[in-house]
C-alpha cells in the first residue's frame, strides 16, 4: 500500500515538473522570438512602425494563459475548485446510492 502511495506521489510530482518545463520553454521561446522580431523591426524601419508589438501582444496572451494554468492562478477554476467539486459529486453519488 505504501509503495503504491509513493508511486502516485512520484507520478504527480513528475507531471508537475513536466508542466513547469513546458511553461518555461514557452516563456523562453517567447522572449527570444520577440527580441528577434524587435531587432528585425528596428533594422527594417528603425521603429517608425513597431509592428513586432502586435506579435508580442498576441503571443503574450497565450503565455499569460499558460501561466494561469501552470501555476493555478485562476481563482474560479483552480486545483482546489476541482478537488472540491469531485468530492461534492462523489458524496452526492454516495447519498443517492444509500436511498436506492
Image: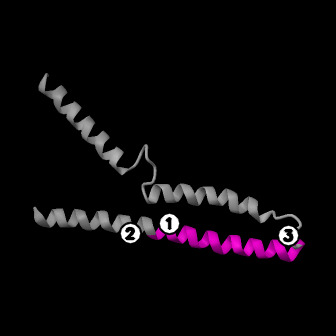
Of callouts 1 and 3, the N-terminal one: 1
Of callouts 3 and 2, the N-terminal one: 2
- Residue linked to disc 2: 17
Residue 47, numbered label: 3
Q: Residue at x 80, y 75 (%)?
A: 40
Q: Secondary structure at mark 2?
A: helix
Question: How far is disc 1 from disc 3 in space, using C-alphas?
Answer: 30 Å
Of callouts 2 and 1, the N-terminal one: 2
- Residue linked to disc 1: 23
List x then y, in percent, for residue 94.
Answer: 17, 32
List x then y, in percent, for residue 12.
Answer: 30, 63
Question: How far is disc 3 from disc 2 in space, using C-alphas?
Answer: 39 Å
Is label 3 or label 2 in front? 3
Relative to 97, residue 3 above or below = below
Query: Which region of the structure is painted magenta?
Result: 21-45
How many labels were placed on the picture?
Answer: 3
State which quarter of the image contains the C terminus.
top left
In the rendered structure, the answer to whether residue 35 lies left or right of residue 84 reads right
- Residue 27, picture quadrant: bottom right
Residue contact at pointers 1 and 3, CB within 8 angstroms: no
Q: Secondary structure at mark 3?
A: loop
Amino acid at each position: 500500500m505504501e509503495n503504491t502511495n509513493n508511486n502516485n506521489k512520484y507520478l504527480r510530482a513528475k507531471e508537475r515538473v513536466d508542466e513547469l518545463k513546458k511553461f518555461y520553454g514557452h516563456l523562453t521561446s517567447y522572449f527570444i522570438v520577440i527580441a528577434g522580431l524587435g531587432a528585425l523591426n528596428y533594422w527594417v524601419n528603425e521603429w517608425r512602425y513597431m509592428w513586432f508589438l502586435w506579435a508580442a501582444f498576441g503571443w503574450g496572451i497565450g503565455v499569460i494563459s499558460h501561466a494561469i494554468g501552470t501555476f493555478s492562478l485562476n481563482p474560479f477554476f483552480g486545483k482546489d475548485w476541482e478537488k472540491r467539486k469531485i468530492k461534492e459529486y462523489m458524496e452526492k453519488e454516495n447519498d443517492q446510492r444509500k436511498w436506492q
